Amino acid sequence: MGETVTSNYFTAEQCLAFVERSPNAVAAHDKDAWLSLFATYNLVEDPVGAAPHIGGVFDRRTGYRSNGRLSRFYDTFIAPNIIRFEVARDIVCGLHVVRDLTIEITMSAQVVVRVPVHLLYELTIEAGELKILRLAAHWELWPMLQQQFAQGWAFLGVGGASAGRMIRHQGAVGMAGFMRALSSVGAAGKAQAGRFAQYFNAGNVAAAQALFSASDISIGFPHAQRCLGIADCVAQGGELRFSKLLAAGNMVSATVEYNGPYGHHRGVVFFELQTRGLRIAALNFYWSAAAQA
């Protein structure tokens, strides 16, 4: 079978192999290898809804434009833990790679948490090489904290060390920025995503259009392959089914199955919602071009 060519002559297989270097570096605790994957200017949202980490801009701690913030992100969240990726599905659409997975984080022998995640890597090309421009990790902070609290006394030492490390590397402002992830569109946002699937499956164009913040929004169906207006998207027909819905900040992501006129697709969908009114501001589906059995 021939390789699938994506943007700028990089194949889907090459994009996926490049992205795989990130969890490999994390597992090996190879900080330099992990940092080298990112573009000169980069954005990390982990989790989405927390204050983003912006690299390549002026950093007060280093005193110059650098990846100092990205380095401190690694020291805070990656270095002290054993992190294992359990990937259920990978999708490559252009220079975007989406991973549907569960991340297992071992904070100590007694404290282990499992976090459902949808990861979006937006890649770019620098000097002919793939680099990560944006990494958006869609996961829910409160359920993860609940898992930690459920460990009881075992979590006290680990939690205290984590808080101290965050203050040391991120400062009080950084800690407050991280805790912003506790606020999200939540169950109401997930319900809004569910309504879109309901109206899509019913072929109800008017009801679907009423969910959006503007009538001229284009939907990636899927991203980087087809860009459709709302009415044209609903007119595709077939059935959408969402599972593993995650609310992070003003985003809702979901594992999606689409049974359409030309086959069955599995992937991930991302809804961006207005925080007031929860109207849909952007919507992108990700699945491979080839239908699946």
Image (cartoon, grey):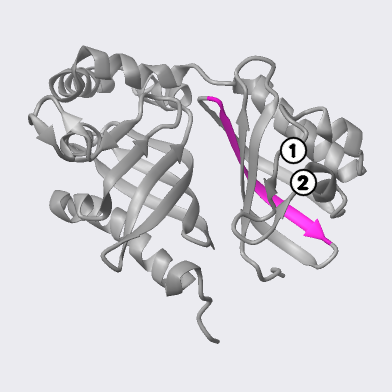
Residue 110 is at least partly visible in this image: yes
**Callout 2 secondary element:** loop
Report how far apart the C-alphas of labels 1 and 2 lie in the structure. 7 Å
Please indicate whether residue 252 sits to the left or right of residue 8 in the image: right
Q: Main secondary structure of the magenta part?
A: strand
Which residue is at 66% across, 56% downward?
222
Residue 153 is at least partly visible in this image: no
**Circle 1 sits on which residue?**
216
**Callout 1 secondary element:** loop
The image shows residue 288 at horizontal and vertical percentages of 61, 64
Which segment is the magenta one? 250-260
Residue 144 against residue 98 in the figure, above or below: above
**Circle 2 sits on which residue?**
229
Looking at marks 1 and 2 on the same chain, the residue that comes earlier in the sequence is marked by: 1
- Residue situated in front as seen by the camera: 208 or 32: 208
- Asked whether 255 falls inside the magenta stretch, the response is yes
**Which quadrant of the structure image shows residue 212?**
top right
The image shows residue 138 at horizontal and vertical percentages of 48, 37
Please indicate whether residue 205 sits to the left or right of residue 221 in the image: right
Question: Circle 1: is it few (<14), some (14-19), or many (20+) Cα within 10 Å?
Answer: few
**The residue positioned farthest toward the bottom in the image shown:** 1
Q: Looking at numbered disc 2 in the image, what kind of residue is underneath it?
A: Gly
Residue 204 against residue 293 in the figure, above or below: above
Q: Looking at numbered disc 1 in the image, what kind of residue is underneath it?
A: Asp
- Asked whether 290 falls inside the magenta stretch, the response is no
Which residue is at 18% across, 31% downward?
58
The image shows residue 208 at horizontal and vertical percentages of 83, 34
The image shows residue 147 at horizontal and vertical percentages of 41, 26
In the picture, which quadrant includes the N terminus?
Answer: bottom right
Which residue is at 71% across, 27% downward?
213
- Residue situated in front as seen by the camera: 128 or 116: 128
Decide: marks 1, 2 in contact (CB < 8 A)? yes
